[in-house]
Image (spheres, rainbow, N blue to C red):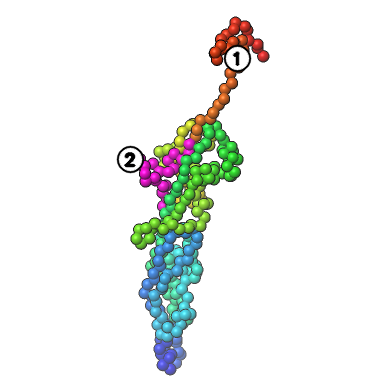
Protein backbone atom coordinates (compact mmCIF):
# COMPACT_ATOMS: atom_id res chain seq x y z
CA UNK A 1 0.00 0.00 0.00
CA UNK A 2 1.17 3.50 -0.68
CA UNK A 3 1.94 5.91 2.13
CA UNK A 4 -1.08 7.98 1.11
CA UNK A 5 -3.45 5.04 1.65
CA UNK A 6 -1.95 4.29 5.01
CA UNK A 7 -2.33 7.89 6.01
CA UNK A 8 -5.98 8.21 5.01
CA UNK A 9 -7.54 4.83 5.82
CA UNK A 10 -7.61 2.08 8.40
CA UNK A 11 -6.77 -1.05 6.36
CA UNK A 12 -7.60 -4.57 7.47
CA UNK A 13 -6.51 -7.71 5.56
CA UNK A 14 -8.40 -10.90 6.49
CA UNK A 15 -7.26 -14.47 6.02
CA UNK A 16 -8.87 -14.76 2.57
CA UNK A 17 -6.94 -11.80 1.28
CA UNK A 18 -9.96 -9.39 1.12
CA UNK A 19 -9.19 -5.73 1.64
CA UNK A 20 -11.58 -3.81 3.91
CA UNK A 21 -11.44 -0.02 3.91
CA UNK A 22 -13.30 1.56 6.84
CA UNK A 23 -14.46 5.15 6.98
CA UNK A 24 -12.22 7.37 9.02
CA UNK A 25 -13.49 8.98 12.18
CA UNK A 26 -14.05 12.61 12.92
CA UNK A 27 -13.58 14.33 16.25
CA UNK A 28 -16.08 16.98 17.35
CA UNK A 29 -14.92 19.52 19.88
CA UNK A 30 -17.66 22.13 20.23
CA UNK A 31 -19.89 24.60 18.41
CA UNK A 32 -20.51 28.16 19.51
CA UNK A 33 -23.81 29.75 18.54
CA UNK A 34 -24.06 33.38 19.56
CA UNK A 35 -27.45 34.55 20.75
CA UNK A 36 -29.48 36.93 18.58
CA UNK A 37 -32.19 39.50 19.26
CA UNK A 38 -35.77 39.16 18.10
CA UNK A 39 -36.27 41.27 14.96
CA UNK A 40 -39.63 40.03 13.64
CA UNK A 41 -37.97 37.94 10.93
CA UNK A 42 -36.69 34.40 10.56
CA UNK A 43 -33.07 34.15 11.67
CA UNK A 44 -30.51 31.59 10.60
CA UNK A 45 -29.28 29.07 13.16
CA UNK A 46 -25.60 28.79 12.31
CA UNK A 47 -22.64 28.66 14.70
CA UNK A 48 -19.88 31.20 14.29
CA UNK A 49 -17.63 28.16 14.04
CA UNK A 50 -17.97 24.39 14.42
CA UNK A 51 -14.81 22.86 15.87
CA UNK A 52 -14.17 19.37 14.50
CA UNK A 53 -11.29 17.35 13.06
CA UNK A 54 -11.39 14.87 10.18
CA UNK A 55 -8.92 12.04 10.71
CA UNK A 56 -6.65 10.93 7.93
CA UNK A 57 -6.28 13.38 5.08
CA UNK A 58 -9.21 15.37 6.48
CA UNK A 59 -7.74 18.81 5.92
CA UNK A 60 -8.03 18.29 2.17
CA UNK A 61 -11.67 17.23 2.53
CA UNK A 62 -12.87 19.92 4.90
CA UNK A 63 -14.25 22.08 2.11
CA UNK A 64 -16.42 19.09 1.12
CA UNK A 65 -17.79 18.58 4.61
CA UNK A 66 -21.46 19.40 5.22
CA UNK A 67 -22.80 20.72 8.53
CA UNK A 68 -26.55 20.60 9.05
CA UNK A 69 -28.93 21.34 11.92
CA UNK A 70 -32.31 20.43 13.35
CA UNK A 71 -34.41 21.37 16.34
CA UNK A 72 -33.86 18.76 19.01
CA UNK A 73 -36.53 16.08 18.77
CA UNK A 74 -37.30 16.63 15.10
CA UNK A 75 -36.29 14.13 12.44
CA UNK A 76 -34.96 16.04 9.42
CA UNK A 77 -31.69 17.96 9.28
CA UNK A 78 -31.19 21.03 7.08
CA UNK A 79 -28.27 23.29 6.23
CA UNK A 80 -30.57 26.34 6.48
CA UNK A 81 -32.40 26.03 9.79
CA UNK A 82 -34.28 29.22 10.75
CA UNK A 83 -36.24 30.26 13.83
CA UNK A 84 -38.16 33.42 14.70
CA UNK A 85 -39.70 33.78 18.17
CA UNK A 86 -37.66 34.74 21.21
CA UNK A 87 -36.78 31.70 23.29
CA UNK A 88 -33.95 29.23 23.86
CA UNK A 89 -33.84 26.50 21.24
CA UNK A 90 -32.06 23.15 21.54
CA UNK A 91 -30.13 22.36 18.36
CA UNK A 92 -28.73 19.06 17.08
CA UNK A 93 -25.75 19.16 14.70
CA UNK A 94 -24.77 16.62 12.06
CA UNK A 95 -21.43 16.63 10.19
CA UNK A 96 -20.83 14.64 7.02
CA UNK A 97 -17.61 14.33 4.99
CA UNK A 98 -16.42 11.94 2.24
CA UNK A 99 -14.88 8.69 3.55
CA UNK A 100 -15.71 9.58 7.16
CA UNK A 101 -18.24 8.32 9.62
CA UNK A 102 -21.26 10.62 10.01
CA UNK A 103 -21.16 12.50 13.28
CA UNK A 104 -24.23 13.63 15.26
CA UNK A 105 -24.17 15.46 18.56
CA UNK A 106 -25.46 13.38 21.45
CA UNK A 107 -26.37 16.44 23.56
CA UNK A 108 -28.18 19.43 22.02
CA UNK A 109 -26.58 22.88 21.87
CA UNK A 110 -28.53 25.88 23.12
CA UNK A 111 -29.32 28.80 20.82
CA UNK A 112 -31.17 31.81 22.24
CA UNK A 113 -33.21 34.49 20.51
CA UNK A 114 -33.51 37.24 23.10
CA UNK A 115 -36.60 39.38 23.67
CA UNK A 116 -36.50 42.96 22.41
CA UNK A 117 -37.46 45.91 24.61
CA UNK A 118 -40.20 48.28 23.50
CA UNK A 119 -41.24 51.62 24.95
CA UNK A 120 -44.74 52.86 24.15
CA UNK A 121 -45.52 56.56 24.18
CA UNK A 122 -48.90 58.27 23.69
CA UNK A 123 -50.91 61.41 24.37
CA UNK A 124 -54.49 61.78 25.56
CA UNK A 125 -57.34 61.38 23.05
CA UNK A 126 -60.77 62.87 23.66
CA UNK A 127 -64.16 61.37 22.80
CA UNK A 128 -67.56 62.99 23.32
CA UNK A 129 -70.05 61.07 25.43
CA UNK A 130 -72.53 59.21 23.25
CA UNK A 131 -70.37 58.99 20.11
CA UNK A 132 -70.47 55.46 18.71
CA UNK A 133 -67.49 53.55 17.37
CA UNK A 134 -68.83 54.08 13.84
CA UNK A 135 -68.85 57.84 14.46
CA UNK A 136 -65.22 57.76 15.62
CA UNK A 137 -63.96 55.62 12.74
CA UNK A 138 -65.73 57.73 10.13
CA UNK A 139 -64.42 61.01 11.54
CA UNK A 140 -60.82 59.71 11.77
CA UNK A 141 -60.84 57.82 8.47
CA UNK A 142 -59.70 54.50 10.01
CA UNK A 143 -61.13 50.99 9.99
CA UNK A 144 -60.74 49.80 13.60
CA UNK A 145 -60.92 51.23 17.09
CA UNK A 146 -57.30 50.18 17.67
CA UNK A 147 -56.29 52.26 14.66
CA UNK A 148 -58.36 55.14 16.06
CA UNK A 149 -56.41 54.93 19.31
CA UNK A 150 -53.10 54.75 17.44
CA UNK A 151 -53.99 57.85 15.44
CA UNK A 152 -55.72 59.99 18.04
CA UNK A 153 -53.42 59.09 20.94
CA UNK A 154 -50.41 59.40 18.61
CA UNK A 155 -49.15 56.03 19.83
CA UNK A 156 -45.53 55.18 19.05
CA UNK A 157 -43.94 51.81 19.76
CA UNK A 158 -40.14 52.07 19.81
CA UNK A 159 -38.03 48.88 20.01
CA UNK A 160 -34.56 49.09 21.51
CA UNK A 161 -31.81 47.08 23.18
CA UNK A 162 -29.04 47.87 25.63
CA UNK A 163 -25.47 47.69 24.38
CA UNK A 164 -22.53 46.33 26.36
CA UNK A 165 -22.24 49.65 28.19
CA UNK A 166 -25.91 49.62 29.15
CA UNK A 167 -26.77 52.41 26.71
CA UNK A 168 -30.07 52.33 24.85
CA UNK A 169 -29.89 51.67 21.10
CA UNK A 170 -33.10 52.08 19.08
CA UNK A 171 -33.67 49.45 16.38
CA UNK A 172 -36.28 48.17 13.92
CA UNK A 173 -38.60 45.13 14.19
CA UNK A 174 -40.48 43.80 11.18
CA UNK A 175 -44.26 43.55 11.61
CA UNK A 176 -44.25 45.73 14.71
CA UNK A 177 -47.41 47.63 13.76
CA UNK A 178 -49.31 44.39 13.20
CA UNK A 179 -48.09 42.92 16.49
CA UNK A 180 -49.40 45.78 18.60
CA UNK A 181 -53.13 46.45 18.85
CA UNK A 182 -54.68 48.61 21.56
CA UNK A 183 -57.84 48.72 23.67
CA UNK A 184 -59.42 50.81 26.44
CA UNK A 185 -59.75 49.38 29.95
CA UNK A 186 -60.64 50.70 33.37
CA UNK A 187 -57.86 52.38 35.28
CA UNK A 188 -56.24 50.17 37.88
CA UNK A 189 -56.49 47.02 35.76
CA UNK A 190 -53.32 45.23 34.70
CA UNK A 191 -54.74 43.89 31.45
CA UNK A 192 -58.50 43.88 31.83
CA UNK A 193 -61.28 43.27 29.36
CA UNK A 194 -61.76 45.87 26.65
CA UNK A 195 -64.59 48.32 27.30
CA UNK A 196 -67.34 48.59 24.72
CA UNK A 197 -67.16 51.92 22.94
CA UNK A 198 -70.18 54.20 23.40
CA UNK A 199 -71.35 52.64 26.66
CA UNK A 200 -69.12 54.31 29.25
CA UNK A 201 -69.53 57.32 31.49
CA UNK A 202 -67.65 60.60 31.31
CA UNK A 203 -64.15 60.24 32.76
CA UNK A 204 -60.65 59.03 31.92
CA UNK A 205 -59.63 55.48 31.08
CA UNK A 206 -56.46 53.51 30.48
CA UNK A 207 -55.17 52.50 27.02
CA UNK A 208 -53.41 49.13 26.91
CA UNK A 209 -51.95 46.76 24.33
CA UNK A 210 -53.64 43.51 23.39
CA UNK A 211 -52.27 40.21 22.15
CA UNK A 212 -52.35 40.04 18.37
CA UNK A 213 -51.81 36.61 16.79
CA UNK A 214 -49.65 35.27 19.62
CA UNK A 215 -48.49 36.24 23.09
CA UNK A 216 -46.55 39.50 22.88
CA UNK A 217 -44.73 38.54 26.05
CA UNK A 218 -42.90 35.87 24.07
CA UNK A 219 -40.99 38.40 21.99
CA UNK A 220 -41.17 41.76 23.77
CA UNK A 221 -40.37 43.34 27.10
CA UNK A 222 -43.07 46.04 27.11
CA UNK A 223 -43.08 49.28 29.05
CA UNK A 224 -44.93 52.60 28.82
CA UNK A 225 -43.20 55.95 28.93
CA UNK A 226 -43.26 57.80 32.23
CA UNK A 227 -42.74 61.54 32.41
CA UNK A 228 -39.59 62.15 34.51
CA UNK A 229 -41.07 65.45 35.72
CA UNK A 230 -44.03 63.89 37.52
CA UNK A 231 -44.57 64.89 41.11
CA UNK A 232 -42.88 62.71 43.69
CA UNK A 233 -44.98 59.63 44.36
CA UNK A 234 -46.88 59.88 41.08
CA UNK A 235 -46.04 56.67 39.22
CA UNK A 236 -48.66 56.99 36.48
CA UNK A 237 -47.44 56.28 32.97
CA UNK A 238 -48.49 57.86 29.70
CA UNK A 239 -51.32 55.37 29.09
CA UNK A 240 -52.96 55.80 32.51
CA UNK A 241 -55.60 58.32 31.41
CA UNK A 242 -54.98 58.42 27.65
CA UNK A 243 -58.67 57.97 26.76
CA UNK A 244 -60.97 60.75 27.96
CA UNK A 245 -64.75 60.93 27.55
CA UNK A 246 -66.09 64.46 27.83
CA UNK A 247 -69.63 65.72 28.36
CA UNK A 248 -71.86 66.26 25.37
CA UNK A 249 -73.25 69.76 25.12
CA UNK A 250 -77.03 69.83 24.93
CA UNK A 251 -79.01 72.93 23.84
CA UNK A 252 -82.44 73.30 25.45
CA UNK A 253 -85.00 75.67 23.92
CA UNK A 254 -87.82 76.73 26.23
CA UNK A 255 -91.18 77.34 24.57
CA UNK A 256 -93.43 79.51 26.70
CA UNK A 257 -97.15 79.80 26.09
CA UNK A 258 -99.52 81.95 28.11
CA UNK A 259 -96.64 83.85 29.77
CA UNK A 260 -95.54 87.47 29.75
CA UNK A 261 -91.85 88.38 29.70
CA UNK A 262 -90.84 90.91 32.35
CA UNK A 263 -87.17 91.83 32.69
CA UNK A 264 -86.09 88.50 31.21
CA UNK A 265 -88.48 86.65 33.49
CA UNK A 266 -91.67 84.94 32.47
CA UNK A 267 -94.83 85.31 34.46
CA UNK A 268 -98.06 83.47 33.95
CA UNK A 269 -100.55 85.77 32.21
CA UNK A 270 -103.66 83.96 33.32
CA UNK A 271 -104.48 82.95 29.76
CA UNK A 272 -104.76 79.31 28.87
CA UNK A 273 -101.91 78.14 26.59
CA UNK A 274 -102.66 76.78 23.17
CA UNK A 275 -102.70 73.04 23.11
CA UNK A 276 -101.39 71.58 19.87
Residue at figure coordinates x 47%, y 43% from the top left: 123
Above-or-below relation of 92 to 185: below
Disc 1 from disc 2: Cα separation: 55 Å
Quadrant in which the C terminus appears: top right
Camera sees residue 73: yes
For residue 11, which quarter of the picture?
Answer: bottom left
Q: Would residue 87 be visible to someone looking at this image?
A: no
In the image, residue 219 lies in the stretch drawn in magenta: yes
Outermost residue toward the left in this view: 232
Picture quadrant where residue 268 is located: top right
Q: Residue at x 41, y 62 (%)?
A: 112
Residue 233: which disc? 2
At x 45% / y 80%, what residue is drawn?
A: 62
Q: In front of the other: label 1 or label 2?
A: 1
Q: Which residue is mark 1?
A: 256
Which residue is more in the foreground, 187 or 150?
150
Q: Nearer the viewer, residue 150 or 29?
A: 150
Q: Nearer the viewer, residue 27 or 161?
A: 161
Q: Main secondary structure of the magenta part?
A: loop
Amino acid sequence: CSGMLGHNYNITVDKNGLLTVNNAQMTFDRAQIQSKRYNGQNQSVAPDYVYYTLQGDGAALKDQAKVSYRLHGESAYTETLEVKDAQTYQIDIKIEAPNHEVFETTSPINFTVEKINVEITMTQATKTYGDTVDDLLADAGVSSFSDWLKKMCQIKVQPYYLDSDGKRVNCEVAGLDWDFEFKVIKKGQGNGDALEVGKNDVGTYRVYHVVQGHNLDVNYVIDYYQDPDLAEGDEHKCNYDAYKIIKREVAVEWVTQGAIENDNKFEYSGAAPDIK
